[in-house]
Amino acid sequence: MKRFKSSLKPQFWLAALPLAAVLTGLAFPTLAQAVTVSSTNPSNGVVNTPTSTNSSKNIVTGTEVSATFSAPMNPATLNSDPAGALLTFTLKDSGGNNVQGTVAMNAANTVATFTPLESALRVDAKYTATITKAAESAGGTAIADPVEWSFTTSAKPFTGQAAVDLGTAGTFAILTKTGITDVYASSIVGNVGTSPITGAALLLRCTEVAGMVYTVNAAGPLPCRITSPSLLTTAVGDMGFAYADAAGRSLPDATELGAGEIGGLTLAPGLYKWGSAVSIATDVTLAGGPNDVWIFQIAKNLKQASATRITLRGGAQAKNIFWQVGGSVAIGTTAHFEGVVLGETLIALNTGASANSRLLAQTAVTLQQNAVTQPAQ
């Protein structure tokens, strides 16, 4: 009862502050918002974690471990380079030994990534990551309690893929260089844009887009059109960088799988490579966890048959699936597609097809009464 009473006192005092401030005309400080770790990669309790990671720069290291914070952090309290310079964010093996590695924040200071110095973690081993209370937000607020999570590596060496960095192209549901055609009515959830071609080549109506419509000039659908050539130039450039990243990944887990026919298969996370066209004649399943990544390198065309589906299982997410296609992409009538398409040429959705996807085409996208929804972040 004594602890309960004492906990009420500061709340009563704080509640009185606004009234005191009104009566005296004095300003008073607001309480700093608590900072938390909103997600981790790998997630807590995950098994069969890859022993190494192939990064966006095609550099293989021991599996990277990251934490996403609820607010921007002070990088000086987390960054650690050289290894061991700071022990706010650590990784230990099952024997309690520190894994040597560096820690770096992303540009927004919201994600801290621990990169082991060794080329791979041990197989079939449990690791524990810890972030101490020394981690502080940009405003100087420390996390309330230490954060700890564990994961277990796979029973055999396995190199996982880091997600492809889409840059500003990742803010678009549809982005093209030469236009978007449409057979009314389609439904697009997310931003759309086209550059360098004029906005007159963007043929969607405002009522079809739940998002922003960007063009390079004063043409395109009204009243929703936003003229922003500089934003589009950056986004199209990032689309090209993302295509090159996906195409340049090495160490494929499978080559020429199914001689190019993947219908009927269940595909684990990894890097898949074909020197020919790929077809999806029947339903295909991608099975893995929420942090797992699939990259499909397809030298020629990708064709999905009508009325077929790509299904995600086990928590797999469309935002982590990347289809790098050197030829054209055709999604059949009423078919359902999942994942980010990085197309070197045309991306065509036939009548009634749907996609939980980003359609990023270096030529055009054609729509025919389609539903395109950008993947959840």
Image (cartoon, helix red, strand yellow):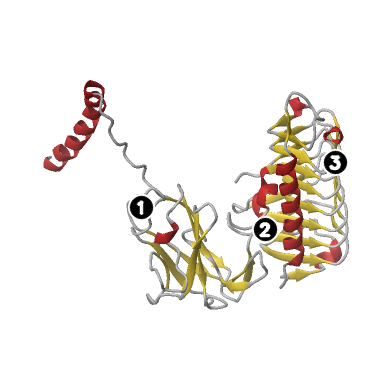
Q: Which residue is mark 2?
A: 164
**Residue 212 showing in the rendered view:** yes
Secondary structure at badge 2 equals loop
Which residue is found at the position 88% from the left and 56% from the top?
A: 327
Residue 82 drawn at (x, y percent): 47, 74
Q: Which residue is mark 3?
A: 197
- Residue occupying image coordinates x 37% and y 54%: 136
In the image, taking residue 89 as reference, residue 287 lies left or right, namely right
Up the image or down, 147 lies above or below 206; here it is below
The residue beneath circle 1 is 143
Crowding near the residue tagged with mark 1, few <14, some 14–19, many ≥20 C-alpha atoms within 10 Å: many
Q: In the shown orientation, is residue 75 left or right of residue 244?
A: left
Please, is residue 364 above or below residue 162 in the view? above
Q: Distance from label 3 to label 2 (Cα)?
A: 26 Å
Query: Rounded to the nearest whole Å, what is the CA distance between mark 2 and mark 1?
Result: 30 Å
Residue 356 can be seen in this image: no
31 to 291, vertically: above or below: above
Distance from the alpha carbon under mark 1 to that under mark 3: 48 Å
Q: Residue furthest top?
A: 23
**Percent coordinates x, y for residue 377 in the rendering:** 60, 46
